[in-house]
Image: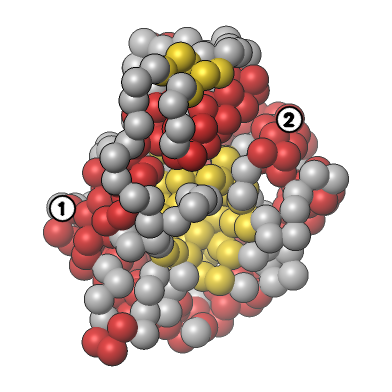
Amino acid sequence: MRLDLQPWGETMTELVTAARAAEAAGAGVVWAPELHRSAFTTAAALATGTGKLAGGEARIGVGTGIALAFARSAMLTAIAAADLDELSEGRFRLGLGTGVARLNQDWHGVAFERPLPRLRDTVEIIRKVLAGGDPINHRGVRSIRVRGWRRPYAPVRDRIPIYLAGVGPAMVALAGEVADGWIAHELCPPADLRDRILPILRAARRQDFDVVAAACCSVDDDPRAARRRAANVVGFYASVRSYGEMFENAGFAGVCRAAGEALKAGRPADSLGDLVPDEMVDAYTIAGTPDQCRSKIAAYDGLADAIKLSAPSYGLPAEETRHAQDRLLDLVGSLR
């Protein structure tokens, strides 16, 4: 199983340094998320800052994990993907996700109606733009009609892999149908992957389809300290209505209610970890001593092709996140 990393940095320079450390540790792909930074700008920094270890033996992949699919036109997304594949010399993977309705409509001022066909159209348009040709036409929830345009630069590869993030069954099935890979939500326990996700993907996925699990990974010699660093991640999602059913089905409805009430009372969403019991942290993150974390990572073997690991950062001082990432990088290196 490939070990991937979502690097963190208080500055872009520090983030690239972390990606280089991940490459030296043997990680397979570094993924750039999109929230406080642009996924494409971050991926460009990662692309130019990696792939250059002595002897050329390491060629770590670079991906957006994930970029918002609707906040940009599909054509601009395709052009950015082609540029990033050139910058990375063929190491780029385009990861896309829909985000939730409020993020699209209130933050970015874009439509969110019929997200499933909208995402299907987005993938098809991106592939048509990347394939070249003139004209480029597509009619659907998202449409495009281009005349007299052709990218005048030779592509690095014939096909750039497209990954889709999905939580619900319809989005997961769409990934298996139209994409080259699926990227899990940050809270993706092995049991959920085995019992809910893989049966959907097996119905549609091709032989070379890449299943990327994901987990916040908090490593410390003191397992309680490790859990407490990861707790804010779980608390954040417990306060989001979209994930309520998932937590309720696992017996954590009371935590969701408490997190929602705390949020309404004015507490920051990334500071709710004190409301999350240790058993909930254990259920949704990889947290503990190095040996405990190795064992929890091993539970994904045979289920995922890769696992995207990220250090805890929600509500933590930068120095604590920095320490947590250093421990994570040590762990990745010990597993390669």
**Amino acid at the residue labelled 1:** Thr
Camera-nearest residue between 39 and 186: 39
At a point 39% along the width and 70% down the height, the residue shown is 60
Q: Position of residue 162 (x, y in %)?
A: 53, 45
Q: Position of residue 81 (x, y in %)?
A: 38, 43
Which residue is the site of mark 1?
11
Seen as rendered, the residue at the extreme bottom is 55
Judge whether 290 appears above or below 248 on screen: below
Q: Secondary structure at mark 2?
A: helix
Which residue is the site of mark 2?
170
At a point 60% along the width and 13% down the height, the residue shown is 140
Q: How is the image coloured?
A: secondary structure
Q: Secondary structure at mark 1?
A: loop
46 left or right of 5 in image: left
Camera-nearest residue between 22 and 117: 117
At a point 62% along the width and 73% down the height, the residue shown is 1
Q: Quadrant of residue 15?
A: bottom left
Q: Quadrant of residue 59?
A: bottom left
256 left or right of 251 in image: left
**Amino acid at the residue labelled 2:** Ala
> How far is the residue under mark 1 from the one under mark 2?
37 Å
